[in-house]
Image (cartoon, rainbow, N blue to C red):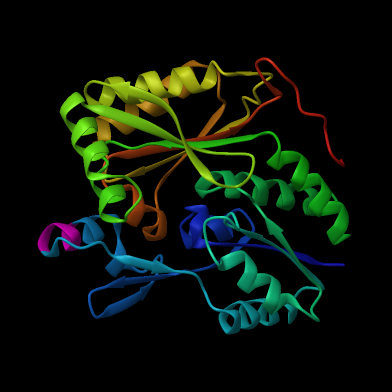
Amino acid sequence: MKIAVSGESTMDLKPNDALGMGIHNLPFHVQMGEESYLDGAPECSCANIFSFVEKTGTLAKTSAANVEEYRAHFESLLEEYDGVIHFSISSRLSSGYANAVEAAKGLNVKVVDSKTISLGIAMMARHAVKMVAEGASDLDEIEAGCLAVRERTEASLLIDKLDYMWKGGRCSKLTLIGANVLKIKPAIVSQDDGKLGVGRKFRGKLEKAVRDYLLSTLDMYEGIDYGLAMLGYTVTPKEVVDMAVALLKEKGFKEVFVTETNATDACHGGPNVVGFAFLYGKKKGFSIPFIGK
């Protein structure tokens, strides 16, 4: 049995990077004014999206792939593979999961609700690739192994300013003003139920806030897998990204994969966002049992 591993552009992996990891990518849609693009196209880079918002005062809009697009994606993969395991952005955040499930009916396709965002999804998909490379060919077995990883994945991001979240109706004007005046930068975290929540809040200049965010997040966990950390950003100063990479390596990560966030997620976070994902053994104070392999 040949199994294909699939995900969406919400994984924040560039198409070539995804394929290099053995993950097939399905893009979401990005609307800027009258123009519509597939996430990953040069026209909807983070810089172009933020330029559009600055010029027009309105957010670029995003939408999931529709059922027909998922179906075509799966059928194309099944021409070469015997089965597909597909990882969707949290069902609590997008219609993508429901569309994928509908499209998969009657096909040898397993759709997994990642219950997370961004590089957290990529961590699960990478684990699926590893299982397939090691000989796993049963979709239920691969899903079980990846669900175990889902329970041990930390995925979060630090928002520099709440302007984009306010424009998108995700926070009040009073919260926006208070955060900007006090220079508060909130961490947005994936919760167990698949929703996003506000974690710790940081103050000060961007570089200091990013450093504090990375250190405090790592300090929340024990048994961290230092084999890989995945770091994403949106039009963030190079010196801040370089500092973040150096810090993660200093803390013991052997590999730090770095990528600019794709358009779907950048539309909601705005400029100067930094986020990362990694695997851990347990959160301090309680442990999570392993599920499956």
Position of 249 relative to 147 (above/below): above
Residue at 26% over, 35% down: 238
Horizontally, is 84 left or right of 203 in the view?
right
Instruction: Tell me where residue 70 appears, x and y as whole percent.
Output: 61, 77
- Which residue is depicted at the point 79% across and 49% down? 131
Residue 137 appearing in the image: no
Relative depth, front residue between 116 and 16: 116
Q: Look at the picture and state if 189 lies above or below 164.
A: above
Q: Quadrant of the C terminus?
A: top right
Quadrant into which the N terminus falls: bottom right
Going by the image, does 84 lie left or right of 196?
right
Which range of residues does the magenta coloring cover? 51-55
Give the x, y percent position of residue 19: 57, 61
Q: Is residue 12 toward the left or the right of residue 292 in the image?
A: left
Query: In terms of depth relative to the viewer, which is nearer, 45 or 179?
Result: 179
* Front-most of residues 5 and 51: 51
Q: Residue at (60%, 58%) from the top-left corner?
A: 91
Who is closer to the viewer here, 153 or 45? 153
Asked if one can make out residue 2 in the rendered structure from this viewpoint, the answer is yes
The answer to which quarter of the image holds residue 2 is bottom right
The majority secondary structure of the magenta stretch comes to: helix
